[in-house]
Image (cartoon, rainbow, N blue to C red):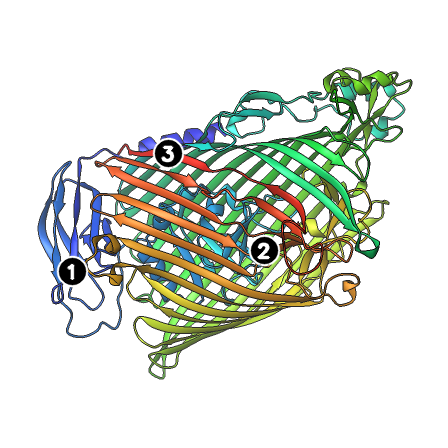
């Protein structure tokens, strides 16, 4: 890591030179009607500097080296204007205002030969309009208006997108498993052991150039999705040299400056890297049962661990975020070179008070309350990330990029549990200490090459991904309140055989690596007077994962001293001895580890046929040969092996009809698949203290297939505006769902297991509006600077369970499917004063997080209205002040069950399984441009 940081620091100070700079700004209008032109391109000839005009026709290009330039102004269907000898003076603003004349005839084609901006609203909308697929997206320009810290918070602004667990994405209300994520056209690795999903919280928002979501299948897209394919593009070649430092503080309601409890950690914990403090000693026995005939060694092993079971108290400091970003461009002969390097760091803390309950419905619909817990959780998150991208443009036809992304995250969590366990007749005073380290590296080498006047294009990618998840010491212990008056407690210490979830520790490690390679050939040719486009390509991915876990518990030793149960927990662990104290006990099972491999080989071909000037069709087929292998062991010792070899033939068609330059209609059909994740196939069981449930895999899972149909009408009033209405229908064969095991309704924890339903369908309507409000009242200065972002999805789905549906509801939505999603944003932007304010709203409909049965109704995550307010103000050429309030309403997160089965969820009559609030977050920060 130290070498990597040294390399990054040297890159900052070797890749740029200081220069005196100035600013060019102005307004572009129509010469005839004097209306402002939105999306006009203003470029300094002979440089890569340029900008697009905003909704007020205003543009601004900062940090231009002092000198004289020719300014070129272009706009579709208007005559290009060149203004020569425009002087840029150091530390001064030069203003030019220009009126463009309409061209005599409409241009047949617009060809951009300079480096185009990809991170603005105008450029992203243009990319969506030009795509032959149904696509939604968001630009870094729009991201900058929010307080979003990472990609997880960014994507929920996109139509039809929601986030589960603060890091997993759902598209069109579908479970996260039905979506695929690519980083620079290569698959992202997983950082999770229990779910099929990419953790979006590992990518800071400042590293994103743009984010596009493809919602319809196409032969050149991966074949494994149903909701959509998310493509994340990080920043590459900059327009100008700059170094920017960002810093912000956040004060969270109910957390900041309050008492904060955490597990004791070693030195340098703040770095987010595992310092080894909680790791098992290197000489710790690999299996205590193998040395069972050596009591002295077992006693020594028990004492060798970090036996610190009391949290450390401190005052919760404010949340902090800082980043240093360098944008550098240079030339080596005729080769243009660009480098973007970002180093970022953040620390956040959250204290929550959670009501956690569980119930069964017995005979005659009698409600049996199992427990009513009150959990106080203290969570600390540290993250460090590095983005290091290089781009080499040899000429307008050939370019190569080398992209690197590294992120390291530390999540520490301490939970104190009180309340009442009615089923087992005790009042808990329970504690858990968890620590998880996650890391991801993704590197891609990409190239694009144009030949034959752009009629032949070859692009390729070679990538390597590596991720890991390390949980070095997850400690849990139960103590019972034996005297409510005095608060006296007694530690629960098993007799004979340990129960690690009552008194024990768990550690696990997951490592995953992936190798990818792909190439595409696009060929334009003329036949019958029409220009056809053929595209062929291939893709290869090899993904390996190893997972191993260990359960260690504690039991009473011989001649146990009963007074130790009533002592302090740390005092108990000072008495690890075979006689009179407690003894460590191995509880690791054969099914607690697995190895797995996935090999994917894919090829495709498609043709783009323009039948008329207004109507074109893209039809193609993708063939994916996938082999999924998993090796583990069942609880009894029998081998558990999976070797699924499946070849999928996936046809697709995308049709587009252009009514005019601003209005078009799209229709699409495609077949896709959904494969089980490694963890879902493994027979491994894991106890989650927080939710009091056990997660278990299923080696008998089948692959799901999906038929997708879409129809979308789009209108682009201006280059920065879009209005669209879409309808879709999806049919699932053997969809994969998370269910509550029918055999786990006893007094203990519920078991969540993954199963196939027989079939399901999902149909819905999407509406998106991104529109300036100036037309509502022409001449209003306020409305001309205000724009509206609105998108919603209304979805209906139903599942057929078939033979597996005994005792379960056969009239419910697909697990994870939300019936509606709404995003609304109001943006006020005064470009001349460099000031903007944004008000953002988000809500999702209730969705099933786990499928229940007759005696245990489905678990629903309930709607939650979220309102964010942000602002930013530029001060001079270098400073920007920004801040806001996140989650203004601070509504609770709730999980409920429809206990009386009336299809209504009412606080007074239905079960609350979980309820908590995270508190408002007030942020204030600054951005300072060093160069």
Residue farthest toward the left in the current orientation of the protein: 85
Badge 2 is on which residue? 846
Q: Is residue 775 visible?
A: yes
- Secondary structure type for disc 3: strand
Q: Nearer the viewer, residue 625 or 458?
A: 625
| Residue 8: x %, y % from top left | 40, 33
| Residue 218: x %, y % from top left | 50, 67
Residue farthest toward the front in the current orientation of the protein: 908
Query: Mark 2, mark 3: which one is toward the viewer?
Result: 2
Residue at 52% across / 67% down in the picture? 217
- Secondary structure type for disc 1: strand
Q: Label 2 to label 1, Cα distance in Å?
A: 47 Å
Badge 1 is on which residue? 29
Position above or below: 75 against 620: above
Badge 3 is on which residue? 924
Position above or below: 902 against 366: below
Quadrant housing residue 277: top right
457 sits left or right of 818 in the view = left
Mark 2 surroundings within 10 Å by alpha-carbon count, few (fewer than 14), some (14 through 19), many (20 or more): many
349 sits left or right of 55 in the view = right
Q: Earlier in the sequence, mark 2 or mark 1?
A: 1
């Amino acid at each position: 890591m130290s070498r990597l940081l040294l390399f990054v620091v040297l890159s900052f100070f070797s890749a740029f030179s200081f220069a005196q700079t100035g600013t060019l700004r102005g307004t572009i209008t129509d010469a005839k009607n004097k209306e402002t032109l939105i999306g006009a391109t203003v470029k300094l000839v002979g440089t890569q500097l340029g900008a697009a005009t905003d909704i007020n026709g205003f543009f601004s290009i900062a940090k231009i080296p002092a000198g004289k330039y020719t300014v070129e102004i272009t706009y579709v269907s208007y005559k290009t204007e060149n203004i020569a000898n425009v002087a840029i003076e150091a530390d001064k603003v030069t203003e030019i205002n220009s009126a463009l004349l309409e061209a005599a005839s409409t241009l047949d084609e617009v060809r951009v030969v300079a480096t185009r901006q990809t991170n603005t609203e105008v450029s992203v909308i243009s990319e969506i309009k030009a795509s032959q697929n149904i696509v939604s997206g968001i630009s870094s320009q729009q991201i900058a208006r929010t307080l979003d810290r990472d990609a997880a918070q960014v994507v929920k602004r996109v139509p039809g997108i929601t986030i589960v667990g603060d890091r997993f994405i759902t598209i069109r209300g579908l479970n996260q498993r039905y979506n695929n994520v690519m980083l620079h056209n290569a698959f992202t690795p997983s950082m999770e052991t229990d779910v099929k999903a990419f953790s979006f919280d590992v990518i800071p928002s400042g590293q994103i150039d743009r984010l596009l979501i493809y919602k319809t299948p196409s032969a050149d897209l991966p074949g494994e999705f149903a909701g959509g394919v998310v493509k994340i593009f990080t920043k590459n070649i900059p327009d100008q040299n700059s170094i920017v430092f960002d810093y912000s503080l956040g004060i969270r309601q109910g957390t900041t400056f309050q008492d904060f409890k955490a597990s004791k950690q070693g030195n340098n914990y703040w770095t987010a890297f595992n310092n080894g403090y909680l790791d098992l000693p290197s000489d710790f026995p690999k299996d205590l049962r193998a040395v069972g005939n050596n009591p002295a060694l077992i006693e020594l092993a028990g004492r060798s661990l970090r036996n610190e079971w009391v949290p450390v108290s401190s005052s919760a400091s404010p949340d902090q975020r800082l980043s240093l970003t360098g944008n550098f461009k240079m030339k080596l002969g005729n080769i243009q070179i660009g480098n973007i390097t970002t180093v970022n760091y953040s620390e956040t803390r959250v204290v929550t008070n959670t009501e956690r309950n569980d119930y069964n419905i017995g005979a005659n619909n009698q409600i049996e309350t199992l427990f009513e817990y009150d959990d106080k959780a203290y969570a600390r998150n540290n993250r460090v990330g590095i983005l290091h991208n290089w781009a080499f443009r040899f000429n307008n036809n050939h370019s190569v990029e080398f992209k690197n992304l590294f992120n390291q995250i530390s999540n520490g969590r301490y939970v104190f549990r009180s309340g009442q366990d009615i089923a087992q007749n005790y009042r808990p005073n329970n504690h858990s200490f968890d620590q998880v380290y996650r890391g991801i590296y993704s590197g891609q080498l990409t190239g694009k090459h144009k030949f034959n006047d752009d009629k032949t294009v070859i692009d390729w990618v070679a990538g390597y991904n590596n991720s890991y998840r390390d949980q070095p010491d997850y400690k849990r212990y139960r103590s019972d309140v034996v005297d409510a008056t005095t608060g006296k407690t007694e530690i629960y210490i098993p007799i004979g055989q340990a129960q690690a979830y009552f008194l024990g520790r768990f550690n696990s490690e997951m490592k995953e690596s992936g190798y990818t390679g792909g190439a595409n050939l696009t060929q334009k040719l003329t036949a019958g007077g029409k220009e056809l486009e053929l595209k062929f390509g291939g893709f290869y991915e090899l993904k390996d994962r190893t997972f191993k876990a260990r359960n260690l518990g504690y039991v009473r030793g011989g001649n146990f001293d009963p007074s130790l149960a009533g002592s302090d927990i740390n005092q108990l662990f000072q008495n690890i001895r075979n006689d009179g104290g407690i003894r460590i006990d191995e509880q690791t099972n054969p099914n607690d580890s697995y190895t797995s491999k996935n090999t994917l080989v894919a090829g495709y071909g498609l043709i783009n046929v323009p039948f008329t000037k207004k109507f074109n069709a893209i039809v193609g087929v993708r063939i994916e040969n996938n082999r999924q292998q998993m090796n583990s062991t069942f609880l009894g010792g029998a081998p558990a092996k999976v070797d699924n070899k499946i070849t999928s033939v996936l046809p697709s068609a995308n049709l587009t009809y252009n009514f005019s330059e601003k209005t078009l209609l799209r229709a699409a059909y495609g077949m896709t698949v959904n494969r089980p994740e490694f963890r879902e196939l493994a027979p491994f069981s894991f106890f989650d203290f927080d939710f009091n449930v056990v997660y278990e895999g299923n080696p008998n899972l089948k692959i799901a297939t999906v038929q997708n149909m879409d129809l979308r009408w789009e209108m682009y009033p201006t280059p920065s505006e879009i209005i669209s209405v879409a309808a879709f229908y999806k049919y699932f064969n053997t969809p994969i769902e998370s269910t509550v095991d029918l055999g786990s309704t006893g007094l203990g924890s519920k078991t969540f297991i993954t199963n196939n339903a027989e079939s399901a369908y999902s149909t819905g309507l999407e509406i998106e509006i991104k529109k300036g409000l100036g037309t509502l009242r022409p001449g209003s200065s306020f409305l001309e600077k205000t724009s509206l972002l609105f998108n919603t999805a209304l979805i209906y789905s139903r599942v057929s369970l078939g033979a597996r549906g005994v005792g379960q509801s056969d009239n419910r939505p697909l697990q994870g499917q939300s019936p509606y999603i709404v995003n609304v944003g109001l943006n006020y932007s005064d470009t001349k004063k460099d000031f903007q304010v944004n008000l953002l709203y988000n809500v999702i409909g209730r969705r099933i997080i786990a499928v229940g049965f007759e005696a245990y109704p489905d678990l629903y995550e309930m709607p939650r209205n979220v309102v964010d307010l942000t602002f930013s103000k530029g001060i001079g050429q270098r400073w920007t002040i920004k801040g806001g309030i996140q989650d203004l309403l601070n509504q609770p997160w709730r999980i409920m069950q429809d206990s009386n089965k009336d299809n209504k969820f009412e606080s007074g009559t239905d079960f609350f399984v979980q309820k908590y609030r995270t508190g408002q977050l007030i942020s204030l920060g600054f951005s300072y441009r060093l160069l």
